[in-house]
């Protein structure tokens, strides 16, 4: 399993969506596409969807299940990722520490070194939800993401608030990352002559 055999077109990038179960990943993926009501069921395995993000750039979103069993497979989805979209239930203070630990583990993975991260501080509609600054602090973003582009976007998957901004941010980061990787490969090729 993994993304090696499922490369997106040359004008695009893979976006891996991770986060604890029930954070709202599947609702978000569905909402990126449409405004219809969505009945969610726990994701067994993964969902995939391709979304046009501007001219000649397609983002392929991989929504990977967040249950403990699926988390063991997360790292196999990270190979060839152009961006990580990490989803947090901002209202579930009880599980924020667990979510932080999982993110820290992911970021330690060598194959996503320098890969940009957008955290979606989801469920902003719920009472007591932590705002983007609080989520930034709780997840220790400054400490763990000093080697890459990152951003924390507040949003509500059920109403769609904040999702356009999130998509735009992911697309911008993924384009920049792709460009920097291509430049690096070209320089390496030049140096080998
Ligand atoms: P997951 O794919 O990360 O496991 P889901 O999460 O998309 O299956 O969502 C889990 C539950 O959270 C769903 O409710 C879904 O409707 C709800 N949810 C997702 N995003 C939001 C949000 O922004 N606000 C609120 N209030 N709820 C949200 P059910 O009841 O079906 O379990
Ligand atoms: Mg799901």
Image (cartoon, rainbow, N blue to C red):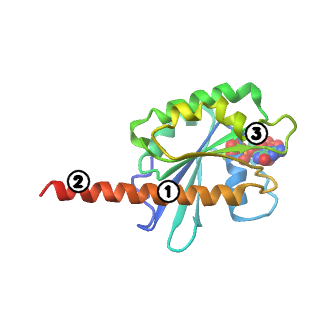
Please state the horizontal and vertical placement of residue 66, each as a whole percent of the image.
Answer: 62, 38
Q: Position of residue 79 (x, y in %)?
A: 42, 46
- Residue 89 image offset from top left, x and y in percent: 73, 38
Q: Which residue is mark 1?
A: 174
Q: Secondary structure at mark 1?
A: helix
Query: Counting other residues with Cα less than 10 Å from the Cα at mark 2, is it few (<14), some (14-19), or many (20 or more)?
Result: few
Residue on which disc 2 sits = 188
Instruction: Give the numbered dot on residue 131.
Output: 3
Q: Marks 3 and 1, how far apart in space?
A: 25 Å
Of all residues shown, which one is farthest toward the left? 193
Disc 2 to disc 1: CB gap under 8 Å: no
- Which numbered disc, 3 or 1, marks the residue that appears first in the sequence? 3
Q: Compare marks 2 and 1 and give the one earlier in the sequence.
A: 1
Q: Residues within 10 Å of mark 3 (few under 14, many from 20)?
A: some
Q: Nearer the viewer, residue 28 or 119?
A: 119
Q: Secondary structure at mark 2?
A: helix
């Amino acid at each position: 399993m993994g993304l090696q055999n499922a490369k997106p077109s040359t004008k695009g990038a893979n976006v891996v969506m991770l986060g604890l179960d029930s954070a709202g990943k599947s609702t978000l993926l569905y909402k990126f596409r449409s405004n219809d009501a969505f009945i969610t069921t726990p994701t067994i395995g993964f969902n995939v969807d391709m979304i046009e993000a501007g001219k000649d750039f397609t983002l392929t979103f991989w929504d990977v299940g967040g249950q403990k069993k699926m988390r063991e497979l997360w790292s196999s989805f990270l190979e060839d990722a152009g961006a990580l979209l990490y989803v947090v239930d901002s209202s579930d203070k009880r599980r924020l520490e667990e979510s932080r630990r999982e993110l820290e583990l992911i970021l330690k993975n060598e194959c996503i070194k320098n890969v940009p991260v957008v955290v979606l501080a989801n469920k902003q509609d719920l009472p007591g939800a932590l705002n983007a600054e609080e989520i930034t602090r709780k997840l220790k973003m400054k400490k763990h993401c000093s080697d890459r582009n990152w951003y924390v976007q507040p949003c509500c998957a059920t109403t769609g608030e904040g999702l356009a901004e999130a998509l735009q941010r992911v697309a911008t980061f993924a384009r920049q990352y792709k460009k920097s990787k291509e430049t690096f490969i070209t320089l390496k090729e030049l140096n080998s002559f």
